[in-house]
Image (spheres, helix red, strand yellow):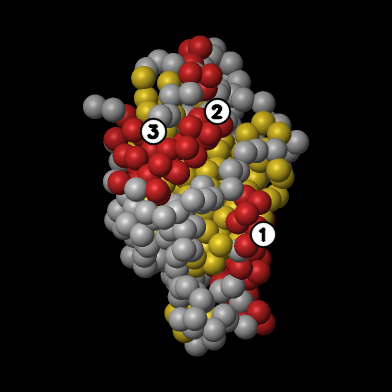
Amino acid sequence: MDPAATPRPRARDLGIVVGPVPTGPLNALTDVPGVRVGHATVRSRPGVHSGVTAVVPDGVRPGAPVPAGLFTGNGYGKLIGSTQLAELGELETPVLLTSTLSAFRAADALVGWVLEQPGCEGVLSLNPVVGECNDGFLSDIRSRPVREEHVRAALDGASAGPVGEGCAGAGTGTVALGFKAGIGTSSRTPEVADRRFTVGALVQANFGGTLRVLGRTLTPGAPGPEGAGPPAETGSCMIVVATDAPLDARQLTRVARRAVFALARTGAAYSHGSGDYAVAFTTTRPGIAPPLADAGLSPLFEAVLDAVEEAVLNSLLAATTTTGYAGRTVPALPADRLTGASPDR
């Protein structure tokens, strides 16, 4: 059996609870109503460990965008579609995450998929949003293994159910904080202005630094015979945040900023070669309800910080030890090393 299919504990299974705000029922991005997630994993052992992940807001298309914001913590990366998203404050396609050199093929495939959707028969221009992390330490990145059929599989297979974590989709070959990482997700249900909302985060974790779990530092230890992992100054993290709270684009940019800030809690180095980006969107379209008052957003900001921190931990805990390109091996984070971490900050 594929070790990636063997269930591993999530942070909460180990008693690691980040923050006081309750999660949604799945503790995932898909707890936000109207948001689906799909993966296509591309693996050809020993050299290819890659894939694509799709975040699909229901009904999003050119002419029917959702409000969105963007924050770039460090711009050493390729986030296709970022300038128009920031300029207009709108997301008009699903968000794809993939491998660096496959991002451009993924964007073209996304354009083709969107043009075929109902209501897009007359579309002459659209803004595909595709983020990436470099999985070249464990995968033959130059082969550009992610192709149109993989993108379409992730988009067409997107569901509102549990989200695959760790070595799945765009996280198949990624490494973070010295351990095998991947996709991670979490959610919170904060109360804002006497109303309960849902906010969810999904991360593609591939960044350097020293792991901290509730303030406790954990390192992989001495490198094995296969050598050390990728240099600490390389790597990136792509974060997607969704909510059903009525927010405008400016407020969603504030939300995205907190999502990148949250990486510091996990030990992120924010190094020269790290591309750290967050895209935040709401499923509540303009006109349905007025935007929340800025002065009341602090509970939502705290929920985002907690959800991103837990999503990173889940990305590490779900991943499995992987041997990939050129025989390089990156170890999984041993769950038993976390059971002594105190839940108190």
Q: Quadrant of the N terminus?
A: top left
In the image, residue 335 lies at what x, y percent?
43, 41
The residue lying at 73 percent from left, 38 percent from top is: 271
Picture layout, residue 203 above or below residue 289? above
Task: Indicate the amino acid at tag 2.
Answer: Leu
- The residue singled out by tag 2 in the image is 101
Q: Secondary structure at mark 3?
A: helix
Q: Give the mark nearest the N terminus, 3 or 2.
A: 2
Q: Residue at x 57, y 55 (%)?
A: 279
- Give the distance between the C-alpha atoms of the residues marked 1 and 3, in whole angstroms: 28 Å
Q: Say which of marks 2 and 1 sits in front.
A: 1
Q: Position of residue 34 (x, y in %)?
A: 36, 65
Q: Which residue in the protein does label 1 denote? A: 87
Question: Is 163 left, or right, of 263 in this rendering?
Answer: left
Report the front residue among 70 and 173: 70
Q: Residue at x 54, y 67 (%)?
A: 67
Can the viewer see residue 210? no
**Tag 3 residue:** 148
The amino acid pointed to by label 1 is Glu
